[in-house]
Amino acid sequence: MKRVAILISGGGSNMVALAESMVGDHPARPVLVLSNVPGAGGLARAQAMGIPTAVVDHRPFGRDRAAFEAALQAELDRAAPDILCLAGFMRVLTEGFVTAWAGRMLNIHPSLLPKYRGLDTHARAIAAGDTQAGCSVHEVTAELDGGPILGQARVPILPGDTAGTLAARVLPMEHLLYPAVLRRFAEGDKSPVLLP
């Protein structure tokens, strides 16, 4: 049974989707929800689901990313996860941290990578005149949103869409895609999951 730690910064809707999927014959179980934001809504949701939680507030570390990541790693060491899932974790991790977790860390990103790495993905897709948007799950590498793609889900961009309306249609697909990819990944299968 694989042990999964989920890193969050906010409400944790993708964390909930992941945790709810890890039941029955699923090859993994959640062992920790870790946030860099004290009071993040996802922490209470995790606690309500019986998942251990921890907080490493990034603010006291200032620009010392190495010290922040050392504190993160100390919490992770206590939980001893096999897989890390970033689920709305809004800190860019250094190459050193990412390299230590190479091949064991996943992230979900709200675009059809390699398009629109970084932020404001929905607005950028609309501005470009794209007809489709969606989300991608990828392995985390030192290149921002650049690791191997393990799954994608697509939604149409409709006339009159705003970044907000598009995001609202993409989010339910994130909640389907990320659990499907995690299950396959935990079984040792890295073939991509493609949803319509």
Image (cartoon, rainbow, N blue to C red):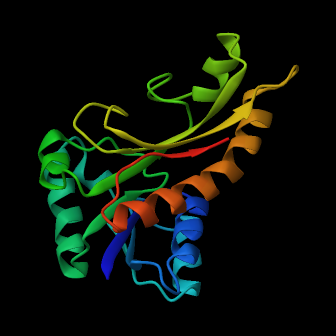
Q: Is residue 1 above or below residue 169?
A: below
| 9 versus 91 height, above or below | below
Front position in the image: 94 or 86: 86
Q: Is residue 37 above or below residue 92?
A: below
User: Which x, y percent locates residue 83?
Assistant: 29, 65
Residue 189 percent coordinates (x, y): 34, 58
- Residue drawn where x is 58% and y is 70% of the image: 16
The number of numbered badges drawn on the structure is 0
Residue closest to the eye, 27 or 124: 27
Q: Which quadrant of the structure image shows residue 175?
A: bottom right
Res. 95 visible in picture? yes
Estimate the x, y position of residue 92 in percent, counting from the top left. 32, 41
User: Residue at the spot x=19%, y=41% of the render?
Assistant: 94
Residue at image position (65%, 29%) is: 133
The answer to which image quadrant residue 121 occupies is top right
Q: Is residue 11 above or below residue 118?
A: below
Position in image of residue 81 (x %, y %): 26, 73
Measuring 55% from the left and 32% from the top, which residue is drawn there?
111
185 or 74: nearer the viewer:
185
Q: Nearer the viewer, residue 113 or 122?
A: 113
Q: Quadrant of the C terminus?
A: top right
Residue 154 lies left or right of residue 14; in this view the side is right
| 97 lies left or right of 193 | left
Residue extending farthest top = 128
Q: Is residue 11 visible?
A: no
> Which image quadrant: the N terminus?
bottom left
